[in-house]
Image: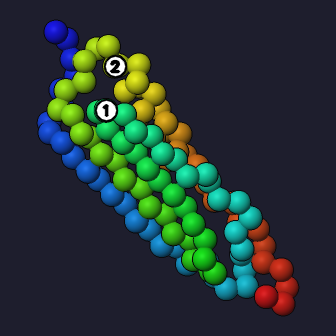
Amino acid sequence: MVKLEFEGPSRDTDSFDIALPPGIYEVDELPPPTDADYSFGSYHSKTEASGQMLHYTRAVEIKELSVPVSKMAELKKFYRMIAADERNTAVLKPAKAGK
């Protein structure tokens, strides 16, 4: 049986805090959270704003050591979704005077 083999199960997480300069910029739009769960892996990301801070978290988990050819379309979709999410951006706008 043909299948894709991973080196082993894994879980990678990232967490970033970005301070916005006070009085210069404010958040206009945030990317939507992304959640994907498959038998072979999962991906979750979220961007939040609080005051002058942007907080971004994401987690990628590979749960199965091998993925059969019958699930290759799902695996491609999984990695394309991650790539698209990684290109998302927060949109900032100039802060209103007096804030």
Residue type marked 1:
Ser
Give residue 71's mark.
2
Q: As drawn, which residue projects farthest toward the bottom?
A: 98
Which residue is pictured at 34% across the width and 19% down the height? 71
In the image, which is nearer the foreground, mark 2 or mark 1?
A: 1
Which residue is pictured at 61% across the width and 51% down the height? 32
Q: In which quarter of the image is residue 1?
A: top left
- 65 and 39: which is toward the camera: 39
Disc 2 crowd rating (10 Å Cα; few below 14, some 14-19, many 20+) is: some
Quarter occupied by the C terminus: bottom right
The colour scheme used here is rainbow
Q: In which quarter of the image is residue 54?
A: bottom right
- 7 and 63: which is toward the camera: 63
Q: Is residue 55 left or right of residue 58?
A: right
Q: Mark 1 points at which residue?
A: 39
Which residue is pictured at 24% across the width and 39% down the height? 63
Q: Where is residue 97 in the image (x, y as percent from the top left)?
A: 85, 85
Q: Where is residue 59 in the image (x, y as percent from the top left)?
A: 37, 53
Q: In which quarter of the image is residue 40?
A: top left
